[in-house]
Image (cartoon, helix red, strand yellow):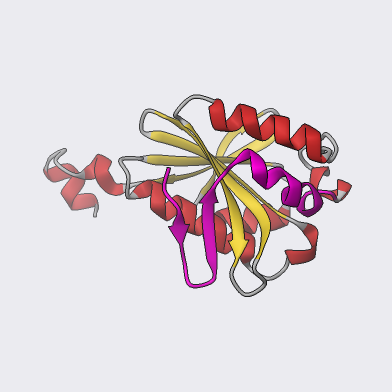
Amino acid sequence: MDTIETPRLVLHPLRAEHADEMAAVLSDPGLHTYTGGAPLTRLELRARYERLVAGPPGWRNWVVWLREEECLVGYVQATIDGRTAEVGWVIGTPWQGRGLASASAKTLVDWLMKREIDTVVAHIHPDHAASAAVAAAAGLRPTDRWQDGEVRWERTGTRHAIGIGSAAAELE
């Protein structure tokens, strides 16, 4: 799995060893307001990361490294099924409000769209304005579809319109 770099951030492929630092990053119960659950202990998180790393090839997970502070600040993930990827992101509370979630999500979505992914999807709680803003910054748009009480957001590539004929060309 690739390391993805920007001038501000590095998305490192997840390793079980990241659990020690990430347990502190993800320790705020407020991070679970819209998703449910509670923060995991360092050992629980390590076991989860071991499962994720060993999971199917379509499970892609990265930790987010902030260059200026030289520390992990959150994670991004993509579950790839064919030409569709469902994405998610979490930035620890101390680093929120600085555009890191938007930068991380946009970096991930752009990377996916360059790799044979036609559609990127995120499911966002309708009251989670910050996550909706992150999705919008990554180029996703809300749809009228819902899943488990969350709105489906999508970004679709232009590959579908290519080679379909003159009607598609006229729409562009």
Would residue 17 be seen by someone viewing this image from the given angle? Answer: yes
* Relative height, residue 107 to residue 38 (above, below): below
Q: Disc count in the image?
A: 0
Give the residues drawn in magenta, as a range. Answer: 1-27
Membership of 9 in magenta stretch: yes
Q: In the rendered view, does 83 fall on the left or right side of 45?
A: left
Give the camera-side residue of 61 and 145. Answer: 61
Q: In the rendered view, does 117 fall on the left or right side of 161?
A: right
Q: Position of residue 18 (x, y in %)?
A: 66, 46
Give the camera-side residue of 81 and 34. Answer: 81
Image point (85%, 37%), residue name: 38
Q: Position of residue 161 (x, y in %)?
A: 23, 43
Give the camera-side residue of 150 and 90. Answer: 90
**Residue 148 falls in which quadrant of the image?**
top right
Image point (75%, 36%), residue name: 45
Would residue 139 be seen by someone viewing this image from the given angle? Answer: no
Q: Position of residue 2 (x, y in %)?
A: 41, 48
Pick the quarter of the image with the C terminus: bottom left
Membership of 127 in magenta stretch: no
Q: Position of residue 122 (x, y in %)?
A: 57, 41
Q: Residue furthest front?
A: 17
Image point (62%, 27%), residue name: 51
Q: Residue furthest bottom?
A: 68
